[in-house]
Amino acid sequence: MRLEPVELTELEYASKREKDARVKERILLVMLVKKDGW
């Protein structure tokens, strides 16, 4: 089965958004830890 370019682009976009969300989560976590002084 051959993926259409549009489907591939949507898959790549979804995985990129997931990575961005994880990065933001980690940044927020680090900021909270620093604020609490751990």
Image: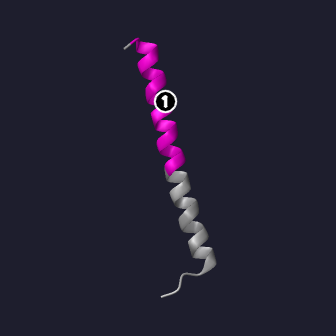
Looking at the picture, does residue 29 appear above or below residue 2? above
Looking at the picture, does residue 36 appear above or below residue 6? above
- The majority secondary structure of the magenta stretch comes to helix
The image quadrant of residue 37 is top left
Q: The C terminus lies in which quarter of the figure?
A: top left
The secondary structure type at the circle numbered 1 is helix
The image quadrant of residue 16 is bottom right
Q: Residue at x 48, y 29 (%)?
A: 28
Which portion, as a residue range, is magenta? 19-37
Q: Residue at x 51, y 58 (%)?
A: 15
Q: Residue at x 55, y 52 (%)?
A: 17
Question: Farthest residue toward the left?
Answer: 38
Residue corresponding to mark 1: 28
Relative image position of residue 29 (x, y in whole percent): 43, 29
1 in the magenta segment: no
Q: How many marks?
A: 1
The way the protein has been coloured in the rendering is one colour
Q: Residue at x 52, y 38 (%)?
A: 24
Q: Residues within 10 Å of mark 1 (few under 14, many from 20)?
A: few
The image quadrant of residue 7 is bottom right
Relative image position of residue 22 (x, y in whole percent): 47, 43
21 in the magenta segment: yes
Question: Farthest residue toward the top?
Answer: 37
Relative image position of residue 36 (x, y in whole percent): 41, 13
- Residue type indicated by callout 1: Leu
Relative image position of residue 25 (x, y in whole percent): 47, 37
